[in-house]
């Protein structure tokens, strides 16, 4: 275990907690009558989104403690659909504040385990095995993406922060898996981005023949399946694989 990887996980977790707290605070300001407001994500309402996030944390806790035994319930092509339905059904019988509390308690357990673990330790997550560093960035990407859905549904202005560096990292770390899902052979990919506060972020081999460059916010929305309808991306590509990657069907996390 290198100290740099350990420091990176701690940095991601610190940003994850900040993103979770930001969404938590906003959720508490939403009147109960508005929790049935529909979003563009699968036509879910706000209760469904937060219930799903809470159930994901419960699933993550199981994966971290029991090596993913809970996934046995969700095998097969309809597994995710079954999981979503169970999460939404559970939340639908709860008051908004209770749903928030469910998510709050569940996420705290996951962060605690990740903070104490080795960055390179692998866990089973759905059909993959990923290390703690990748998993931590995945948790942040999930929170950020579903937060976007909720903010947009309530017409709330939301400005990306430097925390999206870790959402961008998630997109790069997940690129090979995304290629596999789209049945395209993966090729080494270089990512060069400009984020909030003019931060510059790079991932991948700088000598790669395939690269994607440009706005970090656009990249993050691509890799989480959150590009608004009609939005023109400000990303440039070099190489055939890079061009294909932006056109992939990116699974909404």
Image: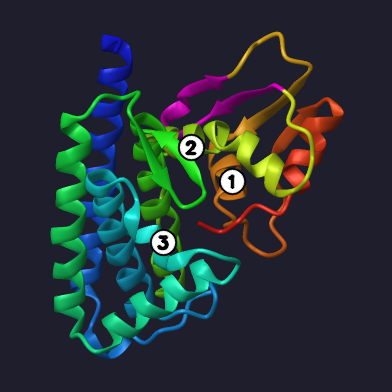
Residue 131 position in % (x across, y down): 39, 31
Which tag is nearer the camera, tag 3 or tag 1?
A: 3
Q: Give the image quarter of residue 158.
A: bottom left
Q: Can the viewer see residue 99 in this picture?
A: yes
Residue 156 position in % (x across, y down): 39, 67
Q: Nearer the viewer, residue 72 or 251?
A: 72
- In the picture, the disc for residue 223 is 1
- In the picture, the disc for residue 72 is 3
Residue 115 position in % (x across, y down): 18, 33
Q: Nearer the viewer, residue 171 or 187?
A: 187
Q: Is residue 200 left or right of residue 236?
A: left
Q: Residue at x 73, y 31 (%)?
A: 186
Quarter of the picture holding the N terminus: top left
Q: Residue at x 62, y 56 (%)?
A: 227
Disc with the residue nearer the chain's start (2 vs 3) = 3
Q: Can the viewer see residue 46 in this picture?
A: no
């Amino acid at each position: 275990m290198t100290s740099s990887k350990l420091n990176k996980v701690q940095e991601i977790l610190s940003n994850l907690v900040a993103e979770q707290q930001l969404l938590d605070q906003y959720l508490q300001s939403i009147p109960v009558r508005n929790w049935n407001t529909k979003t563009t994500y699968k036509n879910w309402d706000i209760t469904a989104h937060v219930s799903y996030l809470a159930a994901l944390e419960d699933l993550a806790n199981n994966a971290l403690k029991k090596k993913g035994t809970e996934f046995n319930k969700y095998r097969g092509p309809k597994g995710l659909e079954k999981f979503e339905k169970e999460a939404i059904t559970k939340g639908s019988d709860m008051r908004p504040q209770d749903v928030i509390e469910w998510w709050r308690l569940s996420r705290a357990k996951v962060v605690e385990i990740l903070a104490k673990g080795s960055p390179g330790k692998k866990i089973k997550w759905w059909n993959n095995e990923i290390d703690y560093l990748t998993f931590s960035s995945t948790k942040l990407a999930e929170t950020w993406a579903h937060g976007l859905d909720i903010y947009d549904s309530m017409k709330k202005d939301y400005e990306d922060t430097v925390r999206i560096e870790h959402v961008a990292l998630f997109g790069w770390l997940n690129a090979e898996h995304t290629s596999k899902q789209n049945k395209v052979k993966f090729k080494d990919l270089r990512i060069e981005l400009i984020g909030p506060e003019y931060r510059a972020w790079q991932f991948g081999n700088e000598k790669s023949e395939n690269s994607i460059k440009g706005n970090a916010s656009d990249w993050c929305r691509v890799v989480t399946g959150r590009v608004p309808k009609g939005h023109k991306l400000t990303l440039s590509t070099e190489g055939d694989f890079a061009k294909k990657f932006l056109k992939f069907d990116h699974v909404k996390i």
